[in-house]
Image (cartoon, helix red, strand yellow):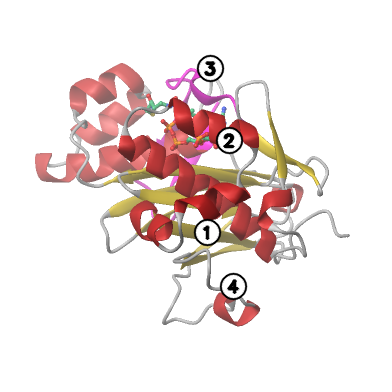
Amino acid sequence: MKQAPDIPTHAIDIWYAYADRLIASDSIENHLKVLSDSEKNQLGRFSLTRVREESLASRLLTRHALSFYADVAPERWQFAKGPRGKPYVVSPWQDFHAFNLSHSANLVVFAIARHGTVGVDVESIDRATTGIPLARRFFASQEVEQLLALPPEMQRESFLQIWTLKEAYIKAVGDGLAMPLDRFFFDLTAAGPAQLHVGDGGQAGTEWLFTQLRLPSRHHIALGVTHPMLTKKSNKQQMYVRAREFKSTQAPITCADVVCTEKNAWYFHQEAK
Ligand SMILES: CC(C)(COP(=O)(O)OP(=O)(O)OC[C@H]1O[C@@H](n2cnc3c(N)ncnc32)[C@H](O)[C@@H]1OP(=O)(O)O)[C@@H](O)C(=O)NCCC(=O)NCCS
């Protein structure tokens, strides 16, 4: 068996699902058959319905989407977690790390690449908590300056972009909030994709590519990826993001569904610097 998904080297697949719609596509009893005992136990610990639904939907989406790439039943995937909680596959693929997930405001997002490291974050554009005071608390000074330079009506949008990009980066690295959020920044002022800067001198993180997409449901998704092919400076590369909704656990997903057309998918291109 192959140990990685058959995804073109420069493509990232995004699968997204609306938690309520996905859960309604079959009985809870059938959904739970796909989950491991520890996943079921964890669900039982959530008191809020919304959190429980998003958590169930994220497990279903992860398992069904992974099964799209391998002849493996959704219930057979086994996962472990890194030191800071980032999940990875241990069986039947061994130590497969090139995926990540995020959920917010009823949307669940799963991003997967052939290899390398992936981080994804989603937020609703309508989330209440944004603003300069919050930026001053969490963001790097360069990011706060970028926001302050904008007219007030544009600050909210840029705040959200920076927030999700930062989350995508710390999730790709796997450190989560153990990574100080003011030690790196994103430059949204230059033309083209957001550029990561890291280190004391704010050097460009050229081995990383970031992209963002917006769903009609007013969810904003940021995605970060790095892998050895992207670090080859001589090898100017393009990254493709293929995004598609996963609507039902009962409808079989076929290859034809995922060969993206302009009708059912968004394409984004990014060039490595
Ligand atoms: C856990 C964390 C990595 C992301 O949390 P989040 O944004 O609340 O949650 P998301 O929905 O985006 O991601 C959750 C998923 O990420 C994955 N995850 C957990 N720990 C992870 C880690 N260290 N690295 C990458 N992914 C991780 C899990 O699959 C998790 O799903 P689950 O909760 O269903 O098990 C962490 O960064 C966090 O707690 N963030 C809080 C938000 C914040 O204060 N951000 C600062 C603004 S820049």
User: How many discs mark residues in the rendered view?
Assistant: 4
Q: Which mark is residue 39?
A: 2
Disc 1 or 2, which lies upstream in sequence?
1
Q: Nearer the viewer, residue 25 or 104?
A: 25
* Residue 138, percent from left and from top: 34, 21
Going by the numbered disc 3, the residue's amino acid type is: Ala
Q: Which mark is residue 265?
A: none
Going by the numbered disc 1, the residue's amino acid type is: Ile
Query: Does label 3 point to a residue whose CB lies under 8 Å from ligand 1?
Result: yes
* Residue occupied by mark 1: 14
* Residue occupied by mark 4: 253
Disc 2 or 4, which lies upstream in sequence?
2
Q: Nearer the viewer, residue 232 or 36?
A: 36
Q: CA distance from mark 2 to mark 3?
A: 24 Å
Q: CA distance from mark 1 to mark 4?
A: 14 Å
Going by the numbered disc 4, the residue's amino acid type is: Ile
* Residue occupied by mark 3: 178
Q: Which residues are magenta?
A: 169-198
Q: CA distance from mark 4 to mark 3?
A: 37 Å
Image quadrant where residue 161 sits: top left
What residue is shown at x 20% (from left), y 21% (from top)?
133
